[in-house]
Image (cartoon, grey):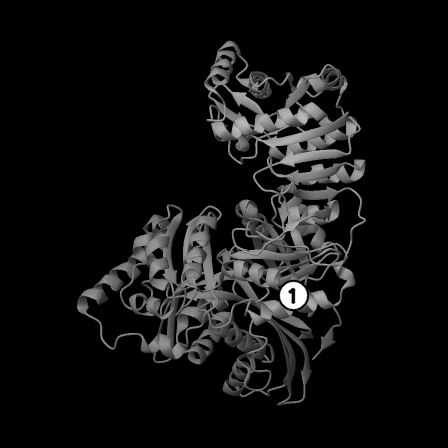
Amino acid sequence: MRLPLRVKVPASSANLGSGFDTVGLALSLYNFFDVLETMPEGEYSIDIIGEGSTELSRDIGNQFIQSYEKACDSWGIAKKGLRVRSSNAVPLARGLGSSSTAIVGGVMIANLFRDVPLSREALLPLMVEAEGHPDNVVPCCLGGMVVSCWDNGELKFVKMPRLPQDIVAVVAVPDFKVSTKDAREALPQNVSMKDAVFNLSRSALLAASWATGKFDNLPWAMGDKLHQPFRSKLFPGGETILREVKEIPECTGVAISGSGPSVIAFSNGSGNPVAKLMCSIFTKYGVRSRFFVLDEDYQGTVIESLPGLRREI
Amino acid sequence: MRMRVLVISLDLFSTQERANNIIERLKRIHKEENLVIVLKNNSNQNQSFGSPGISDEVLKTGRDILHQIHSGLFNVSVIYSQLMEQYGISSVAIGDSDIGLEIDDRDIKVAVSKIDTSLLTQSIRSGQVPVISGGFTQLSRDGKISGNKGASDLLAVAIASSLGTERCEFWSKDTGVYSGDRSIVVNSQKIDELNTDECMEMAVLGFVLPDMEALELARKTGVNIFFTAPFSEEGTWIMANRGNENNNVKAVAYDTDTAKIAVLGVPDRPGIAATIFSALSENDISSEMIIQSVMRGQINDIAFLVKKADIERAITVCRNLARETGAQGVTFDTEIARVSVIGAGISNRPDIPSRVFSTLAAHEINIDMIAATSISIICVVSEPQAQKAVQALHSEFIE
């Protein structure tokens, strides 16, 4: 392996409405983890630039390092120390899979230290186990829209065909955080059979429509009664955005991204009318926001060489 | 006899009473001074012909002429010169072609360099008031007045310069230029004098003022502009020379017609910025306040502002750029405003930046971007906080 190298990891949007804990989409917004050199075992130097630079841990508590060490441990290989520079563009704790980028990045780097590196697909169970659910890390690693099921350490997944290029993903990101704890606690302990069937039918329709290119079904197929009615109450403007954005003619489906508070909407055209409405609603509710207009990332996580001094390890 | 080139906004003729008063005032001025009147369509939208400011008789004349023409467009100066004739002011309507301009002169800046003032001079000598529908202000057959409002300003300054007068007077509803938007700053004060540099900066940063190109021409040709209301003796002088620097903040501006774009994680390679801004330029998207972050890890963030009207095209251009350059992504923010303090020589005052930032901090207003020129300090803040920021800065520096 030649250093320095860069692990380029995409953002991801999980759930996509009806696909609670099972459907996720990789997006063209990236965190870069640059591995600059190796250091003695147990020693780490971490520089963080961009999103989360004032909040993320720069020591052993860093999620990228934890993920790296866990992978090394699980394979029984030496944990070489690392000098890492993390350049983050994926907003932290906003429902865009920021932590998944660290988990996927860490495992991908550990894999390079194996005598015989594993395929990306073979690395997935380790990543899902670290994250606890598959719908961020699987698309984050493989790219594209992925339907995945995780049960007792076993993972089944299908990577779906590409999203047409004339459909963009508009993501409005409010300056507001929803804790994972609150997001989980907001969910009901039990759901009615009626609501379960509502989601079952729509998540099946979502997968079937995506697989066959029937994207006109998305507004319907992204309907949800299991999590969004509860989580949209956790951030100002959430319920209004979900209700009003789907009325815009260009909008082809809207959902809370992950567990929120970002909101993702598919749109034809530039995405501007959708973005404008989402951000103006956040403003109306007193919350600052910004937006991204993203493509589907179909490549997933890649490792690239970095220009500059090369070093053999 | 003294000469006055007068730019009059058409919206001042909005009622019969106002129109009567304006004409009476013109009559009084004309007794002592030679006058050239340039009419200005001050509205962003086309106005409807037949406003109450035009008497029934003149309105009928206008309609008669409309019926007679076939080109579909008509010079509004005829209507207003007839209105003046009604009040006993000898006047003559001057069309664009009468001063050497052609309807195909879309580039008004080029067009003004061709101005031929011989007919104007002749009319003035014979005691007439030339009335010019500046900037190709025309009346269409469907009764809409259209025109490039900036072009009227430029044309007026060009005429003033060509006629050798040092004074070009702009009449609008405001009695001058004020230190802040009077709708949100209760204690805003009329500014007695500005130089063209300050005025141009204020125009860029959100004030409604004479057109930028007109100000530029005024500076170049030494024409002083007096900005006032028709019935006021007071106003604001916009002086062509730069002699009035007193190192104080004179105005606080704000502008919400702007959006922020940040291209994140752009590779640090020579030519990347050229690629980004060439692509924007090719798509006719102007950018301002371009800020590149300090390079770390061979990548930079490049942030800049565009007009809100351009955001749709900018989204497409920037997404393509991010893909082509290998950037991490692009983020957009349309809920922002620029808030600026302006004054010639303020860059010589080390206390001013610190007071700007301390004032905003004291009001818990977060600053997204900062830029400074020799005569302004510009802060980008969230749009809902813009008014509070303007009021706080105005209170700090001017009240």
Residue drawn 72% across and 77% down?
A312
Label 1 sits on a secondary structure element that is helix
In-front residue for pair B187/B143: B187
Quadrant that contains the N terminus of chain B: top right
x then y, percent, for residue B349: 76, 64
Estimate the x, y position of residue B184 in percent, counting from the top left: 52, 54
Q: Nearer the viewer, residue B382 or B191?
A: B191
Q: Position of residue B319 (x, y in %)?
A: 56, 52
User: Most extreme residue toward the left, as rendered?
Assistant: A193
State whether residue A57 appears in this view. Answer: yes
Residue tagged 1? B356
Q: Identify which residue is drawn at 54% across, 70% down.
A: B364
Residue A193 percent location from the top left of the image: 18, 68
Q: Residue at x 71, y 55 (%)?
A: B343
Toward the viewer: B127 or A33?
Answer: B127
Q: Say if residue B287 shows up in the picture.
A: no
- The quadrant in which the C terminus of chain B is found is bottom right
Q: Is residue B385 above or below residue B180?
A: below
Identify which residue, B268 or B369, lies in the foreground: B369
- Classify mark 1: residues with Cα within 10 Å, few (<14), some (14-19) or many (20+): many
Parent chain of label 1: B
Kind of residue indicated by mark 1 = Val
Determine whether B109 is above or below A58 in the image. above
Q: Is residue A146 left or right of residue A204?
A: right
Residue at 63 percent of width and 70 percent of height? B358
Q: How many marks?
A: 1
Res A258 → quadrant: bottom left
Outermost residue toward the top in this view: B68
